[in-house]
Image (cartoon, rainbow, N blue to C red):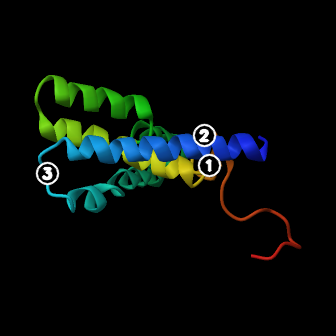
Amino acid sequence: MTKGIHQLLKLEEAGQFLLSIGLFNQLDYAWWLFPALILLPDLSMIGYLFGTKAGARLYNLFHHKLMAVVLLIAGFWWHYPWLALSGVILLGHSSMDRMLGYGLKYDDGFHHTHLGKIGKKDNPGAKA
């Protein structure tokens, strides 16, 4: 991926993160709840205790934006603020992750994502 496109995609994710903040402000919750809950979807990494396939599936379930949008729309549509909040948090978290280069996981290992490999490079001569 070229650097320009990579930066454009990060900017798009930043916009979606800001959208999640705006949507959160439409809900009747205290402001501190957003930062308190924003990392909660990462608890889905517990699935990796049951193997890479189970881990990737559980992680991706809580990091896929369609899940966020479905919860968000359902919450607003049926007037369940807690459901809308769940969608807002999933959207904000997933967007934040994508801005930082963390993508959906393949089932061959945590470090293999749809955005590329994450973590240390396998270059023995590189500085850590």
Q: Which mark is residue 29?
A: 3
Judged from the image, the secondary structure of the residue bearing numbered disc 3 is loop
- Mark 1, residue position: 109
Tell me the amino acid under the disc marked 1: Gly
Marks 3 and 1 sit apart, C-alpha to C-alpha, by 37 Å
Which of the image's four quarters has the N terminus? top right
Please name the residue shown 40% across and 49% down the image.
Answer: 93
- Mark 2, residue position: 106
Left-right relation of 12 to 49:
right
The percent position of residue 109, horizontal first and vertical second, equals 62, 49
The percent position of residue 11, horizontal first and vertical second, equals 57, 45
The percent position of residue 115, horizontal first and vertical second, equals 65, 43
Marks 2 and 3 sit apart, C-alpha to C-alpha, by 35 Å
Please name the residue shown 36% across and 50% down the image.
Answer: 41
Q: Earlier in the sequence, mark 3 or mark 1?
A: 3
Tell me the amino acid under the disc marked 3: Tyr
Please name the residue shown 69% across and 44% down the image.
Answer: 6
Please name the residue shown 25% across and 45% down the image.
Answer: 24
Q: Which of the two residues, 22 or 2, is positioned nearer the viewer here?
A: 22
Observer able to see residue 115:
no
Judged from the image, the secondary structure of the residue bearing numbered disc 2 is loop
* Residue 78 position (above or below residue 96): above
